[in-house]
Amino acid sequence: MINTPYPELSDLLTMMGEAGRHLAEIEASEGAAGNISICLRWDVEPRNLFPTINEIELPQPAPELAGATFLVSGSGRRLREIIDEPTASIACIVINEGGKTGKLYTSPHRRFERVTSEFNSHLAVHYDQICATGTNFHAVVHAQPLHLTYLSHIPRYQEEKYLNTHLLRWQPETIINLPEGIGFIPFRIPGSPELMAGNVEALRNHRIVIWAKHGVMARSDISVKRAADRVEYAETAAKYEYLNLRVGEIGEGLSTEEIRSICETFNVQQNIF
Ligand SMILES: [Zn+2]
């Protein structure tokens, strides 16, 4: 939830650019991998930045989100370049009454044909979270962090309990920032309805989910940079785990007792340890 005064569209575009650049800096967005979207429910005027208007059909109806505005990265755009000229890489979508169609606002400088092919997952997660919590702001990022994605290829890390007890043991911050742990979806075809359904379900109970053999999706109702932070916390945990595997697993990690006392001290509700 964001309180007034609400940020301007240009500020939100800058934050998307900063999040995109940071995801590239932590090696979570090679080439044109990854995509970003935010949804805001206060009134905005997109035409100054995005004067070209087209009608589009939404990947799924979202009647409760009529009037909501989305800023979405374009298909094939590089996350690291959003910051240079945001309107070349981002489209604005305002959902029409009824929730089946929307107005697509774009800039004459846009360098993409369509919005990201993962927009079905983005919209479905925004829709589910906003209907559940009533938030007026929601951000979703998809990125491909190297170590998390590598671990998702190893069978024992494909089991959620094993994944979380091994990744969340390296730094006190991890359980504080990801108290529900990291969700896990088996391999699904990119852009598919199966991946979309998996994201909705996993992100109901987690702030970040691994897409096996592909990457992650993270959400935040505070800022797009907070969503990107969640990718970084999880990726840092995976880096420790990878490091430990490489040296023959000699690190002991925080013990269950140590993690429980951290949670007690910082009032963190968790049921992983
Ligand atoms: Zn991807």
Image (cartoon, rainbow, N blue to C red):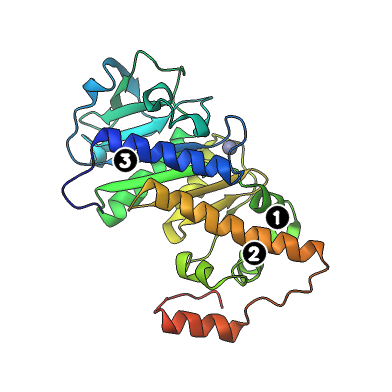
What residue is shown with label 3?
Answer: 39
Other-residue count near label 1 (Cα within 10 Å), few / some / many at <14 / 14–19 / ≥20 = many
* Residue tagged 2: 163
Q: Mark 3 or mark 2, which is nearer the start of the sequence?
A: 3
Q: Position of residue 62 (x, y in %)?
A: 30, 38
Q: Position of residue 228 (x, y in %)?
A: 47, 49
153 lies above or below 241: above
Where is 264 relative to 45, above or below? below
Q: CA distance from mark 2 to mark 3?
A: 30 Å
Identify the amino acid type marked 3.
Answer: Cys
Which secondary structure lies at badge 3? strand
Label 1 sits on residue: 151
Which quarter of the rendered image does ligand 1 occupy? top right
- Label 1 or label 2, whichever comes before in sequence order: 1
- Left/right of residue 31 with respect to residue 61 in the rendered view: right
Q: Which residue is situated farthest in the front direction here?
A: 84
Instruction: Judge the density around disc 3: few (<14), some (14-19), many (≥20) Cα neighbours within 10 Å.
Output: many
Does the closest atom of ligand 1 sit within 8 Å of the Cβ of label 1? no
Q: Residue at x 33, y 47 (%)?
A: 138
Residues tagged 1 and 2 counted as in contact (Cβ below 8 A): yes
Q: Is residue 126 visible?
A: yes
- The reply to whether dot 2 and dot 3 touch (C-beta < 8 Å) is no
Within 8 Å: ligand 1 and the Cβ of disc 2? Answer: no
Secondary structure found at label 1: helix
